[in-house]
Image: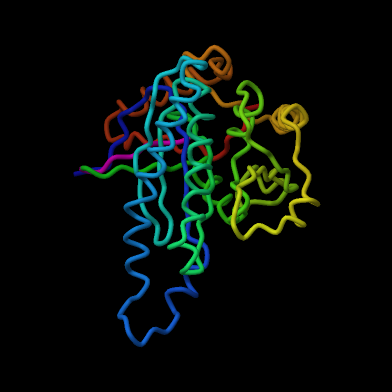
Amino acid sequence: METTHTNFESRLKIFFSVDVVGSTAFKNKENDSQVQPWLQFYKDFYNEFEILFVRNIEQEYERVGEEFDCQKILPNFWKSLGDELVFEATLNHHAQASILVVAFKNALEIFNNNNGVRSFGLSVKGTSWCAGFPVMNAELRHKKDYDFIGPSIDTGFRLTKFATETKFVISIELALILTAKVKNYLEFFYEGKHILKGVLKDRPYPIIAINIKSPNLDETEKDITPVVTRENLDKFLSKFFRDNKIPKPFIKGDNDFGIAPSWYEEKRQNLIKQSEEPGSSGLNLIPSPEIPE
């Protein structure tokens, strides 16, 4: 059966990556009394983190759901990559991004404060990003499996290397949504610009992080890492998007992020026509997220 791409509806997805910190040293630690002493931890991690994430989403909807008046969505487990779990969800309202991000942050903090996790000398770190479909990224299906590919997906995974136990890293698109329209108690840090191989034609990319409370946090380090106000971060990001000709995130039907780039619909229709041509694979691999000249 061939791989197909059949969903041409406009949608913005949000992705969450949670990764184990200190796993290599832990798995190589000698233990004469046990075979694979690390196995139980990974069973718990694989089973319990998703439950914890969903539970915190439910709690966050109870706390602020009526204020935002948006549909409740829950993440889907996408895949595991060794010590890393990745989840995804489709946004239909910008406030859903805030609810899921706050819930994910809380899940990271609770998991890291678990005495069992700490006794192993381990912790987890998180990264989140957005990806628009179908013009700039593609969803592929093969039998019962599915995958997401495209520049936004590549960017998200490149950002994971900047995450730490105390810094939950987010993409600039997600940061723009969180700072521009949604009021929440998140604390943002600006970590400077770094080159992400293949992203923005190798121009430096802003690293934005959300503060994560951790039992291993060095308070003196936090004191010299100033929190960025959401107003200043929003101004900085808006200018960065304009200067680098990056399309802002688009959520179909959203009152605040519902305007697509002027070229968007033409490209989407071209993808549909392309997929209907005899022998076409239906792929829509766009090499750059920048607005065409």
Q: Residue at x 58, y 19 (%)?
A: 261
In the displayed structure image, the side of residue 170 where residue 9 appears, left or right: left
Return the residue found at the far left.
1
Return the residue found at the far front.
115
- Res 226 → quadrant: top right
Q: Is residue 221 above or below residue 282?
A: below
In the displayed structure image, the side of residue 67 where residue 176 appears, left or right: right
- Image quadrant for the C terminus? top right
Magenta stretch, overall SS: strand
Return the residue found at the far bottom.
32
Q: Is residue 271 above or below residue 40?
A: above
Return the residue found at the far right.
224
Q: Is residue 78 magenta?
A: no
Can you give x and y, in whole percent of width and height, for residue 173 in the image?
Answer: 60, 33
Say which of 137 and 181 sits in front: 181
Q: Is residue 140 magenta?
A: yes
- Res 1 → quadrant: top left
Can you give x and y, in whole percent of width and height, for residue 24 in the image?
Answer: 48, 72
Q: Is residue 88 above or below residue 112?
A: above
Q: Residue at x 63, y 24 (%)?
A: 183
Q: Residue at x 32, y 37 (%)?
A: 281
Say which of 291 and 157 sits in front: 157
In the displayed structure image, the side of residue 67 where residue 247 appears, left or right: right
Q: Residue at x 61, y 28 (%)?
A: 184
Which stretch did the figure color magenta?
A: 137-143
Can you give x and y, in whole percent of width and height, for residue 229 in the image?
Answer: 75, 32
Q: Is residue 101 above or below residue 12?
A: below
Can you give x and y, in whole percent of width and height, for residue 22 in the image?
Answer: 52, 68
